[in-house]
Image (cartoon, rainbow, N blue to C red):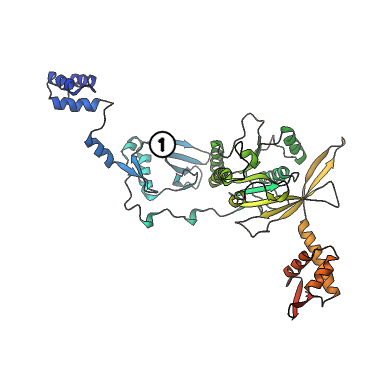
Amino acid sequence: MMPTSVSKLLTEIAGKRPKMVAKAGRTVGISACRACDVARQLDPQRAPSAKEKKSMHSHRTTDSEYGYELGPIPDIKFEDYSTRDHYVFSVYRGTRHWKRLSRRKKPKTTSWIECLASGLCHPASDADRIWLKDVLENPEDYTKIERFPRESHQLWSNLPSFDPHFAPKPKWLINSFLAERSIQLVFGERGSFKSTFMLVAANSVANGEEFLGFKTRQRRVLYLDYENPPTVIKARNDDLRLDLSRSNDLKVWNRFGTQPTPRPEDPFLEEMIRDCVLEKGHGPWIIFDSWASLLPPGQGGEFTGHTAPIYLQLRKLADLGATVTVLDHSRKYDKNTIYGGQDKEAKADSIHNLTIFPNKTRPNNKIIRVESWLKRYAPEGEGSFAFEVQSEQDQKGDWHIAGLVPVQDPIEQAKLRNIEILRKLIRQDPNSGQEALASAAMQEGLSRDQAIKLLKDGAGKHWRVHRIGHNKSSYSLI
C-alpha cells in the first residue's frame, strides 16, 4: 500500500513530463519506472496504454438481435415505477430498452419484454432474461453484467424471421369500412361532406355506437383539424350534437388551441399512442384533416419524394397501435381520381372516394356515395355504400345539418333499373340476340356498350344465353 503522502505528490505531478515524475519519485524513495506508472494511472487526461486497450477490446459486446458490434459495454440504466395496471421495472442499455411487467391485479403474472425503436414490443430472448434477472436482483452490481457475442451470427439460421404468433389478428374498427391499425385514405370532391362524415364516424366509434348501420369497436379518437375555423367546428358540434366539451374519448384539436396541432412526426403522438395502449390495451384512432396541411411548404404531393416521408411517419404510428385516417381532395376535373401522385394510393391500406349524387325526392338533401377499395381486406367494390345528408332550416332561415342516414346505393339502383329494362326486352322478344337487345335498350336510355356489358355480366344470374349458330344467341329469363 502506497503512503498517502506519496499518492498526493504523484497526483499533483500527474500529466507532467516523465523526467519530472522520475525525479519526484526518487525524492520519496520509489523507482522512476514505478513513479511514472502510478502518475500515468492518476492522470485523468491520460490515453490508455496498449495493455489497457487490449483489455477494453476483449470486453466489447455484440447486439443479440442482429449481431452487430456495439463497442465497449454501455452503462445500464434502470428505473422502477408503476402504472394503473402494472408494476414496471425498466432497463436501458445503450439504444436498447427492456421492461419487466408485473400485473397489479389477479392473475398476477410477470413477463420481460423488449421495446424496439419502432415502438413495437416482443418477449425478451432467453439470453437477455438471464442478465436482466441479475440487474433486477442486484441493481448495485449492474456494471459487472456483460453481454457476450453470439457465435456464428452470420449464419442463415440466426437471421431475423417474422413470427405470426406475435402478429395481432385483423379487426374492423368500423365493419367493412375501417380496419384497426391500418392507414385509411378518404378523399372526395369539394362539398362532399368529408369532414362531417368523418366527425360522425369518430363520434360513433368514441361511443361504441353503430355508424350508418355498421357495427363499431369503442376506441379513443383524436381528430386533428388543420384547416377549418372555430366557427365551422362549433356549428358541426352543435348540429351533430357531439358535445365535444364533455366528451372524454373524442378530442378535436385545431390550430386555434393553446398548443400547435401536432403533425405525424411529432413525438407527442407516439407517447400518446403508447399511453393509450398501456392503459386501454389498444391504440386510438387518429384523423388528419387534411393531407395538404401535412406537406412541407412548396410541395404539392405529386411525387414519391413528397409522399414517402409522410407515409413513413404514418406507418410508424400504425405500428405503435394507432388507426390512421387522412382526408384529401379529388382532382378538379376528375372527381374519381385523388389529387397528387399514384404513390398515395399504393401506400394506403384502404381508399374511399366520396361523390355527390342528386336527390330527386328531397333536393336539399344531397346523397353521398362512398366507393370503397379495401385492398388488403376485401375484393374491389366490396364495402361501398351511400348516405343522405339531412338538412333543415331554422326560424332565421339558416340551414343546418340534422344528421346522416343510410340510403340505397345510387349506382346499384341505376344498375337494377337497367337490368329490369333488359329483362322486359327479353320477355317481349326471347329470340332477340345481343345486338338486337342492345339496339332496343338504346331506345330506353341505355348506351350500346352499357347494355352489352350488362348482358354479359347478367348471364347465369338474370337470364340464360342459348347459342343458336355462329356468333348468334338468344336469351331466356331465369
> In terms of secondary structure, where does tag 1 sit?
strand
Total labels: the figure holds 1
Residue 355 on image: x %, y %: 74, 50
Q: Relative to 76, is 19 on the left or the right?
A: left
Q: Relative to 231, is 322 on the left or the right?
A: left
Q: Relative to 356, is 168 on the left or the right?
A: left
Q: Quadrant of the C terminus?
A: bottom right
Residue 329 on image: x %, y %: 69, 45
- Name, please, the residue furthest toward the bottom: 469
* Residue carrying label 1: 78
Q: Residues within 10 Å of mark 1 (few under 14, many from 20)?
A: some
* Residue 474 position by quadrant: bottom right
Residue 451 on image: x %, y %: 78, 66
Residue 387 on image: x %, y %: 76, 51
Q: What residue appears at the point 29 percent right and 41 percent down from the top-left corner?
A: 59
Q: Is residue 391 above or below residue 13?
A: below
Front-lying residue, 144 or 71: 71
Residue 222 shows in the view: no
Q: Quadrant of the N terminus?
A: top left
Q: Is residue 411 above or below residue 424?
A: above
Q: What residue appears at the point 65 percent right and 51 percent down from the top-left corner?
A: 351
Q: Relative to 385, is 432 on the left or the right?
A: right
Q: Name the residue type under label 1.
A: Phe
Residue 308 shows in the view: yes
* Residue 475 position by quadrant: bottom right
